[in-house]
Amino acid sequence: MSFEKIVRKIWILPLLMVMSCDLEIEPTDSIILDGISGIADVSSSVADLYNSLNGQIGDQANLFALNEVTTDELLVPTRGTDWGDNGIWRQLHDHTWSSEHNHILTVWSQFNQNVFRATQILDERSVETSEGELPVLKAEAQFIRAFSMWIILDLFGVAPFREVDEGPNILPRVMSRTEAMEFVLSDIRAALPNLPVRGPGAANNRVNRAAANLLLAKVLINAHIYDGSGTPSPANMQAVIEAVNSIESDGFSLEAGFFELFEASVDNETIWFLETNTGNRMWNGLHYNQAPEIAGGGWNGFSTLAEFYDLFEGDPNTNVVGSGQEERRGFVPTIGLPLAEVNGGTDRETDGVLDGFADGSEVGFGFLIGQQFDVTGTPLNDRPGDPLIFTRDYPSLSGSNERNGIRMIKYNPRFVTNGNGVNHEIVFRFSDAHLLRAEARMRIGQDPTADVNALRSIRNASELATVTEQDLIDERGRELYMEHWRRNDLIRFGRYTRNWEFKNEAAINNPDRELFPIPRSSLINNPNLQQNPGY
């Protein structure tokens, strides 16, 4: 039978949609007939993988929640009847989650599915109408498989894997954390030669060589966590340095103008971004009465701990302009910006309600604390009529009001129209790589102070006389907040299990919480899986 006839005669096994470990085969592009598997249109299948990542990375729940809300950086307190959601947000922040937590189950399912779908694309029987593009497309699929498996091994400590020819009667094998790390490293190194070499540009919504080098650096910087040795290998640290040097040679560099990096425009730092809407990053912390001219207000959920806010230079009790703050802490505007004074009145910012002010310009950047104002400079109130003053403190995780908690924002509403965020969320950027190189140098006995101060100088922060491990993890927090990296960084620096406000006492100094539990349904379906300790 010709391959073309096989393509036309698609047989999908219904049992595969419920098979163990959520390694499902999607009916849209799978070819399964008498043991033959492959992808008929690699280009479309790779595009589908990117589309899946758009939703998975851009979501405010699931992966973002596991990486950020489980840390000292973000919490979602229940405010009256708002944000209760059966306790799922509180459980993440206080580390009382279980194997049935929905965000944990969803991440396990999503990224294991990515791995299987990428494996189908990499099958030698997969074809592409434009044969010259096949090596690049398969390299992209190999990168996405590595990225997705890395997320699974980082969060769960194991990685189930199914070959494309294995039917539903064969249970996926389970790789240990070390085995999965080696698999991921092999994928990255195999993809690197065929990925395009690109510097900064609008085409970096698709992965390039620099993205693969940054993923390589991220895996190697954490290798001593994954292999259980507890001690960074000098060879791995040198490889991190070389990977970042390669990224730099591709044209990426630190760039001034911190919050401008999060607009949908080309800059020297953005290595890889996804075309996912940034609405979740804008609205989930803003109050209902903020920026009503754009989207009818925010969702009033996400906020941060005062101890995280206090990592930044400046007056701890206010963040209006002139409070002695460093650039990355941002500021709270006391009035909006007249449109005519904003970039000459160009369409970079708009005035949809024709009040003379740039829509959303009353919303600050970075950390919002204290009294908030509308676009005309009038102090805002909350819904009960109290002054909308965002406070440093909370009475509890379950008994907060609309005003409790400092809010954080990087993707600002003033650069969108009709309430829609821009389709441009950063996944990898150079300042992350720059700090990883500084860390690698520190871990082999070199002084990282000059590297850290190079970044701090660009961010208008005071230089440090020396840089300790604590200084370096704090610097990563200041630079990379709300970008998916806080949990991974805290674990690597041995700070994830320390005490912070509202953490459950049983979770303090409990290393079992450094991994999430394997979902109970997957344990039942695949006896090769074993539950992580402590669950």
Image (cartoon, rainbow, N blue to C red):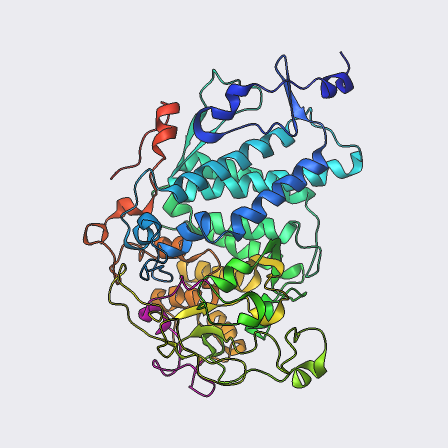
The quarter in which the N terminus is drawn is top right
Residue pushed farthest front? 384
Residue 293 higher or lower than 425, as above or below: below
The stretch drawn in magenta includes residue 315: yes
Image coordinates for residue 433, horizontal then vertical, percent: 53, 60
The quarter in which the C terminus is drawn is top left
Image coordinates for residue 174, horizontal then vertical, percent: 42, 28
390 left or right of 40? Answer: left
Specify whether residue 216 is in view.
no
How many numbered dots are placed on residues in this image? 0
**Numbered range of the magenta stretch:** 299-325
Q: Residue at x 54, y 40 (%)?
A: 146
Residue pushed farthest bottom? 322
Q: Residue at x 64, y 31 (%)?
A: 121
Q: Which secondary structure dominates the residues rendered in magenta?
A: loop
512 left or right of 103? Answer: left
Q: Residue at x 44, y 68 (%)?
A: 287
